[in-house]
Amino acid sequence: MRVEKKVESYTGIDVFRLVAAVLIITIHTSPLVGLSETGDFILTRIVARVAVPFFFVTSGFFLISRYHYQTAKLCAFVKKTLLIYGAAIVLYIPVNLYNGYFKMEYLLPNLIKDIVFDGTLYHLWYLPASVIGGVIAWGLVKKLDYRKAFAVAAVLYLVGLFGDSYYGVIKNVPIFSGFYALIFQVSDYTRNGIFFAPVFFIMGGFIADYSDRGENKSEIVCDQSVRKKSESKCFGLSMALMLVEGLVLHHFQVQRHDSMYVFLLPCVYFLFLVLLQFRGKRYVWLRDLSLVVYLIHPMMIVVIRMFAKVLHLQGLLVDNSVVHFLAVTVASVVFGAAAVALWGRFGRRRKKRHTDMDRAYIEINLENLAHNVAVLKAAMPSRCELMAVVKAEAYGHGMCEIAVHLDKIGVRAFAVATIDEGIRLRRCGIRGEILILGYTVPERAWELRKYDLAQTLIDYAYACRLNEQGCRVKVHVKVDTGMHRLGFDAGHHSNTHIKEILDVFAMEHFDVKGIYTHLCVADSLEEEDVLFTRQQIADFYGVLKRLKKEGIRIPKIHIQSSYGLLNYPELKCSYVRAGIALYGVLSTPDAQTKLQLDLRPVLSLKTKVVLIRFVPQGESVGYGRTFVADRDSVIAILSIGYADGFPRSLSNRAGYVLINGGCAPIVGRICMDQLAVDVTDIADVEAGMTATLIGYDGGKEIAAPVVADDAGSITNELFSRMGSRLGRIVK
Ligand SMILES: *Cc1c(COP(=O)(O)O)cnc(C)c1O
């Protein structure tokens, strides 16, 4: 199943790429050197030093994430960067030849060293540093999570710092000088992929994962503007401190090189946050342009020099540092723009289409999901936590996408049905509690441990077998109070089994984290059902009381699922296990519940009209000829069928869809991959239009519980059967 990330337009970042490329040109042309040495130092050795880290943060922003470890993404990044690096190396061979590069002593070791760390021409070090830094950052975040990963990268940065701007401080300390001498045999500088780049890559990933602003629409506008201002202030302050730092170090001649400063870290961090404030139009070509400008500006320096020599304009074009800088910049930008235009016209392969919406797809509204979380939490007692039930692909919504968003908005407990779902959640980067509600073969105990999953103990025999595996695991004890499905028998009629539960608490390999029960008629407000439920609850608390009497410290307790919360909100438990309500719907239409919450549906189901067909009166449509046109009819064929999870029982006018603002009844039998609707009474329906099977269109709504009810089922089943063939897009 595919999940497509929302396309964000980071205008600020796009535009600053070109600014950063020009800043790098200043480093290599020193525009102010003819006017003021100090001025030039400030511009090129301090201010312009934000440029390369900015590029690292940008790469990290799009590459690094603690969620979704798709190695394919890393591989694509490495491959692309190496390809560009390879091309750049080839491009600069003539310049290397001219400089006599290939005549140097120990050519091979030097060549290897340059290719891996320093670049075969002065500016090219950035590309291998990107690859090495990206891989290190990726690995650190994956293994350690952000805080520890950042700590490790910060230590690397510190090591780099003392080989760079702060070298003078330690160069006379014998152990350090030996250490750095060793480093400098392998790499000319410490500003490379190991010491310099990782911290910025991690910074980028961190910003992407944790300050995903655009999505926080609930934030009050006023807060936003205050935050924006304080980000700008922090950037200004860090820049000022970096200027002081740089000038002081320069004054005391401490620097061996001048790429790395302490205040470069906050400076780049806040710069990036400030740039993120600018959202709007996307300028993809600026990304390409800035890359070309960066790659070819040293070539343009050579070209301008040759040009000046031929035209005898050295005095103006080379010796006047400002004019020289401007000439190189203009030449680079003009050449770059031409290259990008040519590439766009001839070179570019056809843009990859997003294919998810071509046929039939689910649309996920994450804002509504966040809204439902807030509403449910508000309805829960203050110390009770939300345990998000994301089993069965999060009721068809897409488990990873849903869980990641829930994690981002602060949900820390999850429930799944199977161990494999639990493992997948961990692989998506979910770090909180994960409880497996169903059965897991005891032999997989080591995986429960490895992935830190809590297993439900479904009865005494199972508990014994799991304990025998000899592997310490987290467990929740399930108590059967009347559902008679899973759980230790503990009805009020049976007194004998408390001993078994006591045993479990004493078992050597269990870390008992919770004890819970499940209600079986919590959705009903009929008197008889309410009495039954109250008895279930009383029995459960009875068990707890007896455990307490035996000296057991009661772990976390939980009883309610969605309807449990809605009809018995007064219960004070540690968790509510909410599934269907989280997705903004209830199991049946017109459900009566004690609490009426403003829940909003997260899922819409849509498909496309693939063709319009005219069916004359008397002709039939579909298998079994169950529909015969009683008038000349216009029929639209939609590309969705029962294999996509749309129930076949909605055939023959049992269901309808929304197209172009009108309701179109389903005619004939729903096929595996297609269905037909009657659009005779709806104006202007054309092939290519979107049809809505669940959700809103043109002021009308088809609610999922109604569809489920029409199909003789409940919303839970309808959702969880949404086939693996549907595309998924996130709104
Ligand atoms: C599926 C499940 C839930 C979630 O139920 P909803 O009615 O969807 O909220 C809670 N507890 C258990 C044990 C479950 O199996």
Image (cartoon, rainbow, N blue to C red):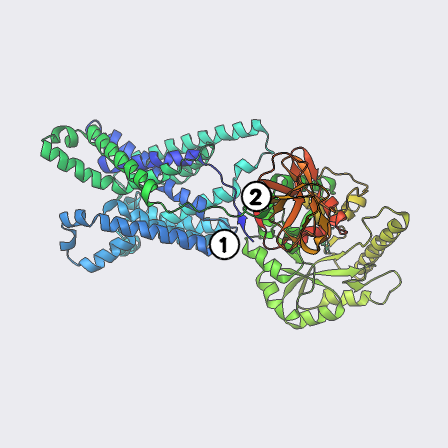
> Is label 1 in a helix, a strand or a loop?
loop
Quarter of the picture containing the N terminus is bottom right
Whole-Å distance between the Cαs marked 2 and 1?
19 Å
User: Considering only vertical position in the picture, is 66 above or below 281?
Assistant: below
Relative image position of residue 433 (x, y in whole percent):
63, 54
What is the crowding at mark 2: few (fewer than 14 residues within 10 Å), some, or many (at least 20)? Answer: some
Residue for point 17% across, 48% down: 94
Question: Disc 2 designates what residue?
Answer: 730
Tell whether 69 sits left or right of 423. Answer: left
Q: What residue do we see at 69% from left, 72% from top?
A: 465
Q: Nearer the viewer, residue 90 or 689?
A: 689
Amino acid tagged 2: Val
| 608 or 249: nearer the viewer | 608
Residue type at mark 1: give it: Tyr
Residue at x 35%, y 49% (from the top left corner)? 130
Q: Quadrant of residue 544?
A: bottom right
When the figure is inspected, residue 242 is found, relative to residue 81, above or below; the finding is above
**Label 1 Cα neighbours within 10 Å, binned few <14 / some 14-19 / many ≥20:** some
Residue 314 vertical position relative to residue 657 in the rendered view, above or below: above
